[in-house]
Structures are given as C-alpha cells and as structure tokens.
Image (cartoon, rainbow, N blue to C red):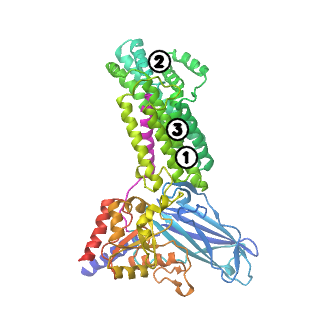
Amino acid sequence: MKKIALLFFLFFAFTATNAQILNPVKWTSKIEKKSETEYLVTLDGTIEMGWHVYSQFTPDGGALPLEVLFNNNKDNFEPVGKAKESETITEFNDVFKVDETFFKEKMQLQQLIKITNPKNEYVQLELSYQVCKDVCIQQNKFFEFNLKTVSSEEVQTFQDRSVVAKTEVKIATKKIEKDSDKKGLLSIFLIAFLSGFAALLTPCVFPMIPMTVSFFTKQSKNKAQGIRNAILYGISIILIYVILGSLVTAIFGADALNALSTNVWFNVIFFILLVFFASSFLGAFEIVLPNSWANKVDRQADRGGFVGIFFMALALAIVSFSCTGPIVGSLLVEAASKGGIAPIVGMVGFSLALALPFMLFALFPGWLNSLPKSGGWLNTVKVSLGFLELAFAFKFLSKADLVMQTHLLEREVFLAIWIAVFGAWALYLLGKITLPHDSPTQSISVGRLMLSLLVLSFTVYLIPGLWGAPLKIISGFPPSITYSESPNGVGGSATVATSSEKLPDGAKVSVHGIIAFTDYDKGVAYAKEVKKPILLDFTGFGCENCRKMEDFVWSQNEIQSIIKNEVVLISLYVDEKQELPENEKFTSKETGRKIKTKGNKWSDFQITRYKANAQPYYIILDSEGKDLNEPVGYTPDKAEYEAWLQSGISKFKK
C-alpha cells in the first residue's frame, strides 16, 4: 500500500510540476520546394487564450517586435524580403504611448528562402519574439530543415527543436482576474451617463422637461395614462440614441472601429471634430439640423399612440441637437476608440440619463416645483462643456503625434495647452471673460465661484508638470515624461539628487533618479562594498507591466526611498540585443537555447536559477547573492510591494 501511495504521490507531483511549465505558443511548421533555388518556410503558432505575440511590424518605443533570424554563417541562402504575416491586431498602448501590432490565438509566418550555395543541405531559422499576458516572456525558437529530403511534390513537416525547460517553469505573480473589455465598456457607460446629465443642463433641453411633463399630464385622460405616456416617451428617447449607436457600429463594423481608432488620420479627424463641437458650445455658431426635418417629425407626432410619442421624442432629439449633438458626437468618437459595441453602450448610457428625468417628473409631478428656473446658468454649463471638449480634443491629436513620432506635441506643449484651456475656463467662471451668448451679470453665484476655484486648482496642479512632475491624476492623457523636450524634467531636475554623485562602475541613473546596475557581478560587488541587500529586477525594455511597476509603484515616495537608500538595484534586461563576445556564447544546459546576447544570458540565468521565465520578477538577495525572500512578479498594490521589500531587508539586518 505504501508503494502504491508513493506512486500516486509521484504521479500527481509530476503532473502538478509540468502543469506549471510556461510555454504559451505551440509551433508547427513546414517547408515547400517552389523551384530549384527557392523554398517556402511556413511557421504556424497557436497562442494560448489571453496571451498575444508582437508582430515584426510593431513600432519602436513599445514592446519588442518579432524577429526572424537566420543561421547562415557560410552564406548558403538568403531570405527574399521580410516574412509575410497572417492577420494582426493593432491597438494603442497607454503605457508606451504607441500603436502596437500583435497576434492573438493564431499566427502564421511565411518566409521565402533563396539557396545561394547548391551544396547546402540545411536551412536554420530562429524566431525571437515577446509573448505577453499579465507578464511578458522573451522566447527564442529554433527551426532546422533538411533540403535534401524535400521534393517539389512533397512537403517536409518540421519538428520544433527548441527544448522546453527540463524543470518546473512558473510565473511568480498573483493570479489577477481581469476583463479589460468589460471595464472599458463600463467606463464608456458611466462617462456617457454623466454626459447625458450634462446635456440635460443645457439651454436646449432643460426647459423642455416641465413643458413635456405638463403636456402629458394635461393631455392624458387620467394620471395613469399620463405616467404611461411619459414612460413611453423616455423609452423612445433611449431607442432613438441606441439606434444611432447601432448604425455607427453597423456602418464601420465592430472590429473595424478599433482599428480606425489607432489610425493617424482618423485621430486627426477626431481632433478637428471635437474642436468644431467645442467652438459651437463656446458660441461661435450653432449646429442645427434642417427645420424641415423638425416640421415633418412634428406632424407625425400628432398621430397619437406609441408612434406619435416616438416622433415626439425624435422631435426633441432634432430640436435639441445644437446642444446634444456635440456631446453625442464626442461620445461616439470616444466609443469608437474602444471598438466593438462601445458606441451602442455609450448611447444607452447617454439616453438613459436624458430620459430618466422625463419619466421621474411624470411619476412625481410635484417635483417640478423644485426645479431651478431657466436662465444664464444654462449657457454657463454649455460653455463649460465647450472648454472640456476643447481640452479633450488634444488627446486625439497627441495620439496621432505619438504614432507618427513627429514630436510636435510633446509633453510640455500638451500641458501648456491644457493649462491655457483650463485657465481660460477658470477666468470665464470668475466673470473675467464673456462669450457671445452670456447674459449680463453684476455678480456670480456661489456655485459658479466654487466651480471656478476647482478648475483654477486643477490648472495650478498642471503647472509643475512642465518641470517633470508625474501628474498621476491625468495619467494616460498627456504624453509620458520620456516623450518630452526634457525627459528628466526642465534643467534635469528629475535627476538632480544623483547628478553630482560619481556613479559606481557598471551603474547608471535609472527611473526616478534611482541608481541601477545592469551587470549582475558588478552589482553584487558593489552591494558587498556598501553592505546592503540587493533588489534583483528581471525586466525588459518592451515589458509593459515592468513600466507600470516603475511608473505607479516605484514612483511612490516610500518605495522610492527604500530602493534608493536601503538596497542596491540590479536590473537585468532579458530582451537586450547586444551580442556577447564569442568566448562568452554558449548553449544552455537547462533549455537547449543558444545564448548569444546579453538578454539571452539574463533570461537563461532567471530560468536556470529561479525556474521562471516571466517579467517583471523581483527577488531580495544578501550581499553574497543568496535569496532572502520568495520572489514576486507584477504587484501593483503599493502596500503589498512595500511589505515584501521590508520583509527581505529585515532578514538581511538580522
């Protein structure tokens, strides 16, 4: 019995261990002879759910693009152009501020090879690519084909010769369940819902509430019928705007909307549209639909029943278009940037907020007495929306600039524009600026004063951003600090604390002015010298969550102080492409990979020592290089990460 129990234990232990092997892309491939000198290599990858592989055409500045490398030391063959790719997805990355192109679920590469040495018998290819989910993995796959066994009538199927780690490979990270699509749609719904309430407080809509509710109350035979008609009126408003969102989705296609949102010219068009809408709200002109439309719809509203009520709602949409049009247009623009059914969700949120007051006041007519009277404050709301739309417009222009890398709208310029827009808004609210449709006033209300103070405070908050302040409240709107005239702040103020220090051998000034070593041995030697523990950071230039950790966790004062003063940081970049000297190149005993670059070396070091191949990955070591605590991966919770740091440091001090 003991032997049987032991066998079961070994079986389950083996199963559990191998279940954690991390290899998100499975490869099959083939080679076909096209002529006497040309062969076509086809590589098919199946990508696990939730993961994605970056294309060879993803731009610089983000994740690292896929590379097709050729082991061709004897000039036996040459590639004919770049490898052709199957269908890819392009999305804007808010962390790197670039459009990224990648594969999901399936990918295929086809590379035409021309043989230049007739005696050559083998073709060897290597794929170097980054595959990401909650973490990123830099992978290399090797392929070899025997040309002598391939005829024009046959296809040679290839077996991937790369070796999976012989021991357990796992992700050292928390299991974070997330659904970015659902969060994106929820944010669109909430923004649209709030925008609907904002539209209610405009001169075109607000006066319609008591008029419409009174109409249903007086024209209905009894109270119940009045309530029913008002509810049908509200439902009709929702239907009209949902149909509009559905039309936008149907015309462009759910998937095409997202692709369009990352296109340079569409972002420029979105920018122009929002400036146009903002100008209308500020009083330059009014956007109105033809009067004939309103007259025709009005005549249909007399038909009675649900059809008549529906046309009454349509008449409201047409008559109020000068106020609601810019808001609806802006929402559709923003929803288009999310893709999928976002335009429909946005219109549901907007129309629900617009319709609710009509239904509620019909249910409780007494509430009408508590409504504030129409007046100049409605135009103040409209103008305020204009300032917001003008500021928001530059988000789209910035996206186009980042994709094109023209550096015309760098961080300082973007912030200067926002400071000017919000500063002008504050002056308007204080009555220092008047616009065409404003009513003359001798004083401003307390509410208007409070709003002006809020806007003025936000304007003052933006100003330090010109000197390198992170401005976390608006993170994702302006370009990152790296896309600016002064990446280290004006006058290099962001690194002033370390600029006067002589850097140790092998160290550099990293993010937030932190001194970091990029060579393990030199970092350990320095830690011995200063008698401090080591924070070992396996990272990557194209690792999105590594940048998130640096931007949102390491930037916290408490964390930053610990990393600067209490540990020696060693950052090893697993995707560094610098070639190793010939005498330092080797084949990994753990994975069978050919270690040719510094990135290969640090990746193999992580796999060999920690049985892990995902980034980010952090460990606290003593000055002798021994582990002091359990490694962690992506840990966005500041308190949790700080506690983890302190646990390793406290063990070092014992």
**Mark closer to the observer (2, 1):** 1
Tag 1 secondary structure: helix
Residue 268 figure quarter: top right
* Residue occupying the far left of the picture: 654
Task: Please report the residue visible at 30 percent of the width from the left and 76 percent of the height from the top.
Answer: 628
Q: Which residues are magenta?
A: 172-201
Which amino acid lies under the numbered mark 3 shown in the image of this protein?
Ser
Does residue 77 appear left or right of residue 62 in this picture? right
| Residue 26 shows in this picture | yes
Residue at image mark 1: 396
Which amino acid lies under the numbered mark 2 shown in the image of this protein?
Gly
Residue 552 figure quarter: bottom left
Q: Earlier in the sequence, mark 3 or mark 2?
A: 2
Callout 3: 10 Å neighbours few (<14), some, many (20+)?
many
Contact flag, marks 2 and 1 (Cβ < 8 Å):
no
Callout 2: 10 Å neighbours few (<14), some, many (20+)?
few
* Residue occupying the far bottom of the picture: 583
Q: Magenta span: helix, strand or loop, mainly?
A: helix
Residue at image mark 3: 330
Relative to 98, say whether 112 is above or below.
below
Image x and y of residue 532, in percent:
32, 77
The CA distance from mark 2 to mark 1 is: 44 Å
Q: Earlier in the sequence, mark 2 or mark 1?
A: 2
Residue 292 figure quarter: top right
| Residue 21 shows in this picture | no
Residue at image mark 2: 305
Tag 2 secondary structure: helix
Contact flag, marks 1 and 3 (Cβ < 8 Å):
no
Image x and y of residue 128, in percent:
56, 71
Task: Please report the residue visible at 51 percent of the width from the left and 77 percent of the height from the top.
Answer: 598
Does residue 591 appear left or right of residue 363 in this picture? right
Does residue 650 appear left or right of residue 570 in this picture? left
